[in-house]
Amino acid sequence: MNIAIFFGTETGNAEMLAEDIATELEDQHETTVANLADSAPEALQVADLNVIVCSSYDDGDLPASAKPFVERVQSEMPDLTGVRFAIFGLGDSEYAETYGFGSMKLAELLVSRGAQALGERPVHDAAGDELPEDMAMPWLLEIIEAADA
Amino acid sequence: MSAKIAIVGGGPSGCYTAQALLKRAPDLEVDIIDALPVPYGLVRYGVAADHQGTKGVARQFARIFTRQNAQFFGNLRIGRDVTLEALRRAYDVVVLAAGLPGDRPLGIPGDDLPGVIGSGALTRALYEHPDAEALPELGEAPLVIGTGNVAVDILRLLAKTPEELSGSDLGAGPSDWLAAQKIRQITVVGRSSAAAARFSPVMIKELAELSRVDLRLAAGGSDAGEVLAAAVAGSAGPLPIDFRFESRPVALEPLGDGLQLTVETPRGRETIAASSVISAIGFTGDGSFDRDGLLAEAGGAARLYAAGWFRTGPVGAIPQCREEGQRLAQQILDEVQPDPARIGRALFAGRAGITDFDHWQHLDALELAGATDQRCRRKISRRDDMLRPANLQDA
Ligand SMILES: Cc1cc2nc3c(=O)[nH]c(=O)nc-3n(C[C@H](O)[C@H](O)[C@H](O)COP(=O)(O)OP(=O)(O)OC[C@H]3O[C@@H](n4cnc5c(N)ncnc54)[C@H](O)[C@@H]3O)c2cc1C
Ligand SMILES: Cc1cc2nc3c(=O)[nH]c(=O)nc-3n(C[C@H](O)[C@H](O)[C@H](O)COP(=O)(O)O)c2cc1C
């Protein structure tokens, strides 16, 4: 199964995690990594397991690199039925009211177009001590196992 | 391609440029040189002590040295320890990413009176920069000139209770200093209207949520946006913070133990008394480079490039440094013409006192080991201790 990893970022943390995920998986799977800024809605393919890493900005908004993608989905209204995605958020609990909202908004948008969300949507807390890859890998391996089965 | 690239400055723009260069061309020899013994520039000494999440980019930057094979040359000031000319002869490309460390002066009569401090000088002292001045007495009624995010950072730190500073890396000295300040009111003066102020709305929201803060619109502000209006309506702590918009500073004079600021407003001239003045109106060079001349010369032919605040002026935050670093990396790779005769890092061979990235990792571990319930890190602040941390351990 090809695993297509996308990231939405402003300061690069989501890109680093996306690359870490690809490195961890590359022995077992085909992987690709792409910035959402360079991705069209068609990049989300039914045959792939799509993994998205996305941060949050200004009052629960999407990070800059996710915005053009989201605008295209909103205007082109693609049918994403059959598309499966797992999404991992980056956030900061200091922004308590909008914690993880960037990834949440993106997930809701994809689901509204018919895509299926796999697993939970964990959010890494930049104000906490845990490393994002330590949270993301067990989460994703479980999703991959379930998807393979 | 194994061109030799020297980046002067290990702040966000230098680091993102190195990251992007090495991602595209892993065999480059990229050396990041910083005047300080430690890397990361304003991520360590500008981003607020209570915004630790923003400092998380340091994890990416560390990988430039631990995985992408860039080398760090700390405690090496270009223009003093090594000339820029020598550096340019030794490397195929030099990138100037030295930031803008100076406070832009107010440019009004009295702007150099005692009791006037720049936001850069104040934040460096608060965040324990090794070259910082001593923290000043601010008195009962400090006045902040400027309405950008740096001004709001300062307001927030001044207004926080000790509990609200929990989890930050504000040092013991600055924390004690803060607790000893007897501030009863803060005035903020800005030239622009409220709607045109540069602070980001989330920063105002965060300020208004503090227990002691009472945000007030003392002058101007009829065009205040939703967030500022809500912040004013929703904050009711014991510490008034008065925003005065559309107030252009014209002169500072001594007044009693303090100062008096005259401002030009749509209603005419007004005067504001203050116990101290913090100017937060931007940054400029500190004179160590002929910035204008170098920027004019920069380009492929000169094998010289500029990045970050050094190039753009003091505008733009960390995300802009990243975007620009990626663009610049591509430009450099398109234009570089490596010459194997250039000696690169051999220029520094045998020079005493240079710190490398291992040295920083050692300091970093020591600082993290000094964390407490209240603080996520204990910064080492004296240059001597940074250079010889073994002395600290013995003490
Ligand atoms: C108080 C403050 C708070 C900020 N808070 C935030 C925030 O919360 N979020 C955000 O996104 N942005 C914030 N910013 C903006 C952000 O810090 C800048 O966008 C960014 O640091 C600019 O990066 P730079 O690499 O150009 O400069 P700098 O970070 O200043 O790095 C320049 C480096 O060059 C070194 N250097 C200087 N001269 C020499 C020399 N002659 N030889 C060798 N080395 C030299 C310096 O020691 C320094 O390490 C803040 C800025 C300030 C001033
Ligand atoms: C100005 C600013 C606003 C932010 N707003 C939010 C927010 O509303 N919710 C949240 O969960 N995280 C917020 N964050 C935290 C970032 O999402 C977090 O630092 C993340 O690791 C950044 O990842 P990136 O480098 O991929 O952009 C904010 C960070 C900044 C600097």
Image (spheres, rainbow, N blue to C red):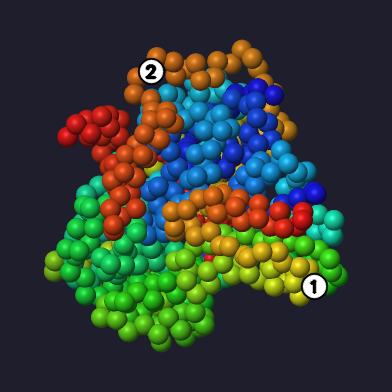
Q: Secondary structure at mark 1?
A: loop
- Quarter holding residue B234: bottom left
Residue B339 image offset from top left, x and y in percent: 65, 17
Residue B191 image offset from top left, x and y in percent: 43, 71
Q: Of residues B370 and B72, which is closer to you in this image?
A: B370
State the quadrant of the N terminus of chain B. top right
Q: Which residue position is annotated with label 2?
A: B351
Q: Nearer the viewer, mark 1 or mark 2?
A: 1
Q: Is residue B17 above or below residue A104?
A: above
Q: Write down the chain letter for disc 1.
A: A
Q: Give the label on residue A113, or none.
A: 1
Q: Of residues B68 and B107, which is closer to you in this image?
A: B68
- Disc 2 marks a residue whose amino acid type is Arg
Q: Secondary structure at mark 2?
A: loop
Q: CA distance from mark 1 to mark 2?
A: 62 Å
Badge 1, how many Cα within 10 Å: few under 14, some, many 20+? Answer: some
Q: Say left or right for A95 vs B307.
A: left
The answer to whether residue B317 is visible is yes
- The residue located at (43%, 43%) in the rendering is B41
Residue B310 image offset from top left, x and y in percent: 51, 44
- The residue located at (69%, 35%) in the rendering is B24
- Quarter holding residue B170: bottom left
Residue B78 image offset from top left, x and y in percent: 43, 29
Q: Is residue B146 above or below residue B74?
A: below
- Quarter holding residue B216: bottom left
